[in-house]
Structure formats: C-alpha cells, structure tokens
Amino acid sequence: MKKLQPLILVIIIASSLFYFYRNDQEFTGNQNAPTDLTFKIIDGRQLSLEQYRGKPVLIDFWATSCAYCIQEMPDLVALYEELSTEGLEIIGVAMSYDRPDMVLKAAKDLKIPFPIALDIDGEVADAFGDVNVTPTHFLIAPDGKIVNRIDGTMNLAGIRNKIKTMLSKEI
C-alpha cells in the first residue's frame, strides 16, 4: 500500500490540473444568459443583462481573497479600456462570501472602471449555474447566448479575439 501512495497522489494532482486547465467550455449557442436577475452595483445602481442586449458582455465572478482574481484584474481593466468604446461590457460579480467593504476597497485600489456587483445572497451565482470557483467568466454574445464559460484564469488573447469578432459582426 505504501508503494501505491505516491502513485495515488500523482493521479489526484494530475486530475486536478486537468480540471483546472480544461476550463474553457464553449457552448453551442443554445443556452441563454439569465435576463430576469438584477445586478446590485456597488455605486447603488441596478443593472440587468437585458440592458446590454446587442453588445458582448463578459461576466467575471471574482473574490477579494482569490489571488488569481486579483492578478487577472489589470488584464480585465485593460480589455475593458481597449474595447468598451466599441461596445464591450464587463460586469464583475463579487462572491457572496466577500465582505462588501473589502470589495469596495479592492475596486478602488485596482481602479476597476466597469460595474462591480455585490452578490450578497448568491442569487447571481445561482442563476449562472451555481458558480463556486473563482475566477469564473461567462462570455455572452450580443444575442444573449452564453458562448463560453471559463473556470479559472482565462486566455486573454483568445477571449479578446472572440469579442473582437462579435464586435465586427455588429456593424
């Protein structure tokens, strides 16, 4: 049994890495993003996805305690600054376990220009299929269909290309 322990450990680690790196799931375009929920933004506004119909939207589930989320945030800010004038929308969704004061501080410290929602009751995470891993991203096409779900950090170049393709088709 002792000889099997290292092998079992390697299998567990390999399985975990496989799960983490097979994180970009493409959808067939048949799954609609939830439109009947409200995002409660830290500045007091309330938004719905229906408001963004006709534009690509990237939903970013994140947490202040998630090192990958914080590390990835400057890339999301840069993506937003690059493509928001062309129509891209990003909504950051802080997980229900995140303290609102910590979310406010992080949003300020990281100079996040896009809306950040507090998901205090977990309603938004539930509506997107019980999101419990951070970061998790959903790319929503202008027609309201989910085209990608990415669990873990995303391939920024790949997402940028998909968004640019969506934006070029809007013309």
Image: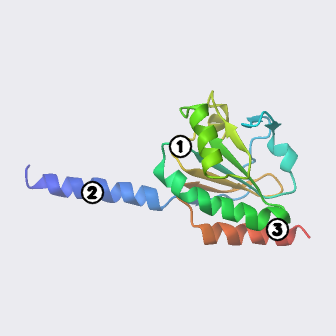
Q: Earlier in the sequence, mark 2 or mark 3?
A: 2
Q: Residue at x 7, y 50 (%)?
A: 2
The numbered mark at residue 16 is: none
The numbered mark at residue 167 is: 3
Q: Is 41 situated above or below 20? A: above
Badge 2 crowding class, 10 Å Cα cut-off, few under 14, some 14 to 19, many 20 or more, is few
Mark 2 vs mark 3: in front: 3
The numbered mark at residue 64 is: 1
In-front residue for pair 89/101: 101
The numbered mark at residue 11 is: 2
Mark 3 vs mark 1: in front: 1
Q: Is 83 situated above or below 1? A: below
Q: Are marks 2 and 3 in contact (CB under 8 Å)?
A: no
Q: Position of residue 43 (x, y in %)?
A: 76, 37
Q: CA distance from mark 3 to mark 1?
A: 30 Å
Q: Are marks 3 and 1 in contact (CB under 8 Å)?
A: no
In-front residue for pair 136/67: 67
Q: Quadrant of residue 58?
A: bottom right
Q: Are marks 2 and 1 in contact (CB under 8 Å)?
A: no
Q: Earlier in the sequence, mark 2 or mark 1?
A: 2
For mark 2, give the secondary structure: helix
